[in-house]
Amino acid sequence: MKNIVGVRFKKPGKIYFFDSNNFEIKKETYVIVETVNGYEYGEVVIANRQLPEEKIVNPLKKVIRIATNKDIKQYNENKSKEKEELK
């Protein structure tokens, strides 16, 4: 059994599963995860849950850390800049 969490990067958006990396993570917690594009910021929409190894599509990337206040601030600044650039 593997301990996983479900993370969403955009609302609405697809839910991706990550190895919880032994963190106990509740729903609506923001995390930094490893993706094929590097580290990304996302919201946990499915809290810790056990899943049989055979149901997991490997390789399963890991949660790097629970987002810090600095991560949240940086994410919000980037989103604000993104809106400005689109104008």
Image (cartoon, rainbow, N blue to C red):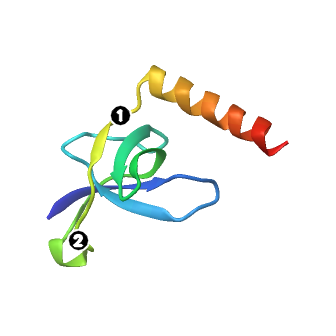
The kind of secondary structure element at disc 1 is: strand
Q: Residue at x 33, y 41 (%)?
A: 25
- x and y percentages locating residue 22 in the rendered image: 18, 43
- x and y percentages locating residue 53 in the rendered image: 16, 71
Q: Earlier in the sequence, mark 2 or mark 1?
A: 2
Callout 1 amino acid? Ile
- x and y percentages locating residue 57 in the rendered image: 27, 74
Callout 2 amino acid? Asn
- Residue 13 image label: none
In the image, is residue 69 above or below residue 13? Answer: above
- Mark 2–mark 1 distance (CA, rounded to whole Å): 22 Å
Mark 2 vs 1: CB contact within 8 A: no
The kind of secondary structure element at disc 2 is: loop
> What residue would you read off at disc 1?
66
Q: Which residue is drawn at 38% across and 40% down?
A: 32
Q: In terms of depth relative to the viewer, which is nearer, 48 or 61?
A: 61
Q: Which residue lies furthest to the bottom in this view?
A: 54
Q: Which residue is drawn at 24% across and 77% down?
A: 55
For this view, does 84 lie left or right of residue 67?
right
For this view, does 48 lie left or right of residue 44?
left
> What residue would you read off at disc 2?
58
